[in-house]
Amino acid sequence: MAEKKLARSPLLYIHQPNVDIPEAKMQYDYMTPKAASDTQTKLNDKQIENEIQENNEDNDDEEDKRSSRRAKFKEMTIDEKIDYFVNMPSSLPKMKCEVKTGERSYRGIINDKKEDDIFMLSGRRRVKIAVDEIEWIRLLGF
């Protein structure tokens, strides 16, 4: 049988103490189980390939659903952007944005939408902007 192996003592201490050599039980050998027969491995490989293909198809379907559910902010239409701001959960902080009309631009928080108008807090005042006049909306952050 193999000689019993023990852990080595530490190499360097600032002050060399008198300690016993630590005994650590270590694994000496490891044996792998015998490989299955070739026919079984081929069947297992085919099963694994089929499962991978099925998972990839499911993942593609999920990605399509995710991409149709949620578009990038820059790719949204003006109405979608307004709905995004108005329908944000109350648990999230309100996002600031910049709304550009033909006459001027407003910076603030879109609070509400009624019929064809949006209401926006710009500084301390509340501004009413017609949706038809909006040229673009840019997300600014918190």
Image (cartoon, rainbow, N blue to C red):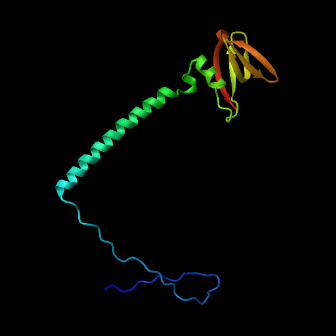
Q: Of 91 and 18, which appears nearest the observer?
A: 91
Residue 67 appears left or right of 52 = right
**The N terminus lies in which quarter of the figure?**
bottom left
Farthest residue in the right direction?
A: 124
Q: Is residue 74 left or right of residue 122?
A: left
Q: Position of residue 131 (x, y in %)?
A: 66, 12
- Quarter of the picture containing the C terminus is top right
Residue 13 placement, left or right of 111: left
Please identify the quarter of the rendering in which residue 62 is found: top left
Residue 5 versus residue 132 in the image, above or below? below
Measured as percent of width and height from the top left, residue 45 is found at 25, 49
Q: Residue at x 28, y 42 (%)?
A: 50
User: Is 62 placed above or below 107 here?
Assistant: below
Above or below residue 61? Residue 100 is: above
Rendered position, 18 above or below 108: below
Quarter holding residue 6: bottom left
